[in-house]
Amino acid sequence: MTIQEVEQGRLRSPFYPRQAEIDRLNNWHEWKGYSSADGFYDTTLEYFSIRNSTGVFDLTPMTKYRITGPDALDYLNRLVTRDMRKIKPGRVAYAVWCDDQGQVIDDGTIFHLSEGDYRLCSQERHMSWLTMSAIGMDVSIVDETEEICALAVQGPTSFSILQAMGIKGIEKLRPFGLAHFDFQGSGIMISRTGFTGDLGYEVWLSPDQALDLWDALFEAGKIYGIMAIGTEALEQSRIEAGFIAAYVDFLPADVTVRSGRSRSPLELGLDWLVDFKKPNFNGRRALAEEKRKGSTWQLVKLDIEGNKPAHHSYVYANPKSKKEVGFITSAVWSPVCKQNIALGTVRSPHGKVGDKLYVEVYYQREMHWSRVMAEAIVVDKPFWDPPRKRATPPGPF
Amino acid sequence: MSERYDAIVVGAGHNGLVCASLLAKAGKKVLVLEANSQVGGAAVTRTFADGYSVSSVAHLLYQLQPQVRKDLGLNIEMTASDMPTVALSTDGKHVRISGDEVSGVNAHDVAGYKNFCTRMNRFADLLKTFLNKTPPRLAKDASRSDLLTLAQLGLDIRRLGKVEMQEFLRLIGMNIRDEVVERFDSEILRGAISLDAVMGTHLGPRSPNTILTYLYRLAATHGAIDQPSGGMSAVSEALAHSARDNGATIRTNMKVRRIVVENGRAAGVETESGEKFSSWLVVSNADPKTTIMELVKPKNVETGFTHRIHHMRMRGNAAKLHLALDGLPAIKGVDKREFAGRFIIAPGDDYVERAFNHAKYGETSAKPVFEIVFPSFRDSSLAPTGKHVLSAIVQYVPYELRANWNKKSRSAFEKLAIATLAEYMPDLKERITATELLTPVDIEEQFHIHGGHWHHGELTLDQFLFTRPVGGAAQYAMPLDGLYLCGAGSHPGGGISGAAGRNAARAILKSGYAL
Amino acid sequence: MKKYDAIVVGAGHNGLTNAAYLAKSGLDVLCLEKNDYIGGATVSRNLYKDWYYSNCSYVCSLLRPEIFRDLNLARHGLQVTPYGGGTVFMENGDYLGSYPDHEVHYREYARFSKADADAYERYSADTMRQCRFIRDFLLRTPPDPTSFKPKDLKELAHLGSRFYEMGEQRMYDTIRFWTMSVAEYLDEYFETDVIKAALSGSGIIGTALGIHSPGTAYVLLHHYMGDVDGSMGAWGYARGGMGSVAKAISGAFQSYGGELRTDAGVDQIVVKNGKVKGVALTTGEEIDASIVVSAMDVKRTFLKCMDKNDLDDDFYNRVKNFKIRGSSGKLNIALDGLPTFPALPKNSPLLDGDMHFIDSMERMERAYDDWKEGTWSKDPYVDMVIPTVCDPTMAPPGKHFMSCFVQYCPATVEGREWTDEERDQFGQTVIDQIAEYSPDFKDLILHCEVRTPKEIENEAGLTEGNIFHGELTMDQLMFNRPIPGYAQYRGPVGGLYMCGSSNHPGGGVMAAPGCNAAREILLDLKRRDITPANFGDD
């Protein structure tokens, strides 16, 4: 018996041959075992393609689980905090799932592909938790991460590009909708979802279609300013959209070593995802208790004065105080809003919308360090939320 | 519209009956539903051959908590009390144990055994105070009473005095083998004590934890063994009587199919026949796995809790063998009068350990260990005149037999067990007129105990006190509003003790389920 | 005649550490060693040509970094290099690799089960949480739960608060972790037999228990709680073999003015008027000191090196009943070259890691059954490493040193002394097991030293060759170690202290008992505490 040795280095996405052709920076990092580009040409240009034309991001390393079986709905409904009975076939739900203590394990999207047939996508791997959750239920969970690759096609011209590519009926797709389309004689799935807070789609296909699809997409997109983008550009748009990321803005509760380092959905500003009216779900009792007693932490979106991103900063309730009330988890200068923005975590009762807080920003100019206590206002809406994101059919923006 | 009760108890096992009786006594309208035709669960007397009856699972009474007797005013007639033990040896040089006295061993062991009993009983008394309390929650926001109980436990241990406290903290995690080898010369005596420590468990004498199981055995009556008149049903009937007297309704032949959950809380039960009964309080005397995995269903509780319940260890390891005999068998060196007592076949701690080895690999012991009684000797109601019943607990007989339990493996094991007995009772085979073997699988099927484990889950430190059945649910209330557990799977564990049922009832009444 | 402030008996790593701290504090310290070399079980021995065998302990990770830094061990020549990877060879020709690269490791586990590959993260986090909990107590003296002294109450409160801080569910998980068996612990995470077998070894190494015995999950910590440069659970080689550890600590000891004497076996610890007076050597020479610290295990200390009349009966009996069982043996092999393992791909990084040849939980447990019957395992659990793949100093270029740690191997065979023939059979059992997976292995053997517990006891002085100086079972941990009431390093006689691994926190080349004992001695002498505190990681 000869045993095939497992791949020793980093895995490459099926799109890699095309990415390698256009790559000028040779900046890659590891994401769930895959090589994922930081950027291909220039982060600023890539970023603006998302806001001005179309950026294409390779989502292949996203973990994808197929969930089927007679108990699939009951299973998911107990797994996540929102009511999955309301998610009809052809719809996608953004959801969080918690442990019994109501602490967030991860967030992700659940695609209702057809009646009783679901796909759950997340940044982290959860086979262990999903399998544990399936004890005593008639449900099948299959990891199809390697069987499905995906591209995020994001930006105002994304609709026009897909239309130009010949995707018939794409105009009917509403936000958080999904549909199956024909592509060169075989099927692909497209969902109107994304991580950028702008008009955009995610295209899901099998690896053998990868290069043809890439070629067709970029051919159609030529006149619409299509551009491959890396993680750095995506990260900027993610913060502008106010989306949280695992291991950045929160830690998966099932693998935190220290106590008190995990967060509940209520603390992450995701109370709108928690449906106490549905029967039972993981964390329900603990979250009901937290709702009654009040949360310890509050995730805040901050609009900070000045233009120095508040990376890793402490947050204070007043500029003179010695004791911080929280810290920044994600920070960026928003080129499109021309705002200095951040996501952070502060202790209750701080962090109510409109609160004025202070962040301690350190920055360096030519070997000279400065420290400022910058005023920061807690805002409730995402920093970037254009109407085109919601228009159906989308216009040729 | 189904009839509404203040509380529905699922299962009329002895704990269920204790709990029901106490709830009814407090003025609650209580319904008890039992799947079998008899009350008592695993504490029953059944006819296994024409004219022959036997206590089907538990056959000796030694753990019934005095508090239970007192609270319910029980008066159970015994045909035998303080039964002595004869630990058999093939050569006829048996060891006889009665209370803290032992004979058939050297002077060192006689004195040693007395000492051993004194110390063990002192620790057992301490354990007893734990057994009759609801385990406290360990949490920063624990209630005052949790903290008080915890402090009380600490104080009780400290009250032992410095030296004894040290010894208690050392012994509690230890194995029985090291203790008996340290103390006794007699192999037979070592074996007999080992057997008492490992009976009903998936542990061998060398497994750490077997001091705990030994103490647990002693924790009600210092191990004094009684035989209820008419078999174990006498206990169950007395409990049922008490429950009915207090106003509870008991219905047999009513197997509960599911516990009804509405709006995230228990709302009643539905039987196999489709009958529904409503109550905001459902108390399950079924084991934790049956309760959660089958009656409640995992979707109604949470993942972490389900996972913990799923991994609770409760694979039975003991079988019951019942023989109908046309007369008492001869045992070399045993006087006829001694048949009123208990016999043990466990000649040596190594013998028991070797018997256990097989169980680890899903095999039955090549040389099993036995606890044997002849209940008909004192109780003529159990067999026709002049005839007798041999009732034996046989170890180790794994629930998950690698070769699977079927006709062939059953009969092979029955043969082996009888052959082993015959080494001590040469004329046994000729005297057998009927047999009944209850493997853990049979016990599971007939008594609805998952894994056929009579403790409803291994009694080891990781499934004890704070973590029985599982951490976070040790206070009888399950993480589903309105659902309580009152069986042996909850603290403190199995045996005909009634402690779980009593503690559960007290916890329920204290929680303000005064509906 | 000269009288020392303190005599430390035994120049193993704990004795030397203790001596170093006492000397550093300014005491006049003599450290005595019976062998003509130091180190005890922490040695590199030149037993064959130019080979240096780490012939007892063989890998290094538990050595407390606080002590490493505090005693300047790097300056005294100690260098610990991490190694990664491991293999379990399977009977069906397959193998299970354990790779240092997180993602490759994931893929390898996923080859057997995706759920298991993923569960590994949860398993690591949960185990790490227990490591963090226990690590805080390694450099602390266990409190006496029966005492009402402020110091003990304070320590108890500290223990309690560390425990409470974990949160409710995790407290219960902790109680379970400390009491359950390694097999059951692993069952809660993994479904693949070979993965469980691979991980279960750490629950029984050096322990006279099987993987199904309650309490063995805790033993995992004694293999995970170490770290190399902050990477918890990592293992490393001491460059030059384990003797470098002892050499470096003795370097530190001598730099503080301590005096070391080898070939000086202690026959008796001399007691007069209920206080130690000094020691008598096997040569008859008597040396006086007001403090005697024994780095030997408690049985050797009190049953062999003290007069029974100096001890009270209860104490004596408790020492007698202290469980210290020989359960492991060792093969040290000089190799003419690197053996090949055809099951592994060419150039596999796994060739640099440790290797195991038991692929199922049943085989693991059956190995223990043999031991219970009083014989060595016929299909043993072998932890095999070849340190020379990354340490060029232990064998000539191109040649190699192989260390095989073998579980289980009893102190006596069916109650009798080992015969030479039986020892050779034991060695052959191990060699045959490895040769199943490496056809050229036998031909490469130039020299092989087979060590049963008997040899280990005779040379290193460990009773029954027990590597931990006493079983790591609950009844012998924390305030129960070695004996309830004597867990604070003080012996039953004035001026007598214990600093070996029989004491909290137990065995492994950790040096914590030596350091903790020094702290208590300095406290009694009302000298400033110069022992290091836990680094802490938050």
Image (cartoon, coloured by chain):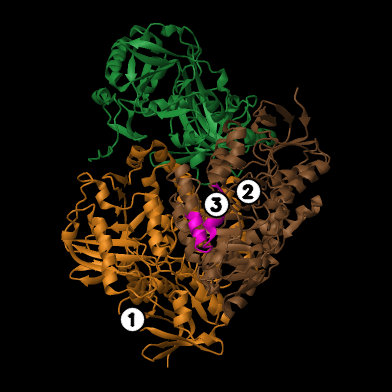
Chain colours: A green, B brown, C orange
Q: Residues within 10 Å of mark 1 (few under 14, many from 20)?
A: some
Residue B202 point in image, percent of width and height: 52, 53
Total numbered badges shown on the rendered structure: 3
The quadrant holding residue B327 is: bottom right
Residue B456 in the image: above or below residue C214: above
In the image, residue B419 lies in the stretch drawn in magenta: yes
Q: Chain of mark 1?
A: C
Going from the N terminus, do you reach mark 3 or mark 2 first? Answer: 2
Q: Amino acid at mark 2?
A: Ser
| Alpha-carbon span between mark 3 and mark 1 | 58 Å
Highlighted magenta segment, given as a residue range? B416-438
**For discs 2 and 1, the disc positioned in front in the rendered view:** 2
Q: Quadrant of the N terminus of chain C?
A: bottom left
Q: Secondary structure at mark 3?
A: strand
Q: Which mark is residue B318?
A: 3
Q: Chain of mark 2?
A: B
- The residue beneath circle 2 is B56
Query: What residue is rendered at 47% in x and 70% in y?
Result: C502
Q: Which residue is mark 1?
A: C262
Asked which secondary structure carries label 1, the reply is: loop
Residue A198 position in % (x across, y down): 46, 17
The image's mark for residue C90 is none
Circles 3 and 2 on the same chain: yes
- Is residue A283 in sight in this rendering? no
Q: Amino acid at mark 1?
A: Thr
**Do we see residue B24 in this rendering?**
yes
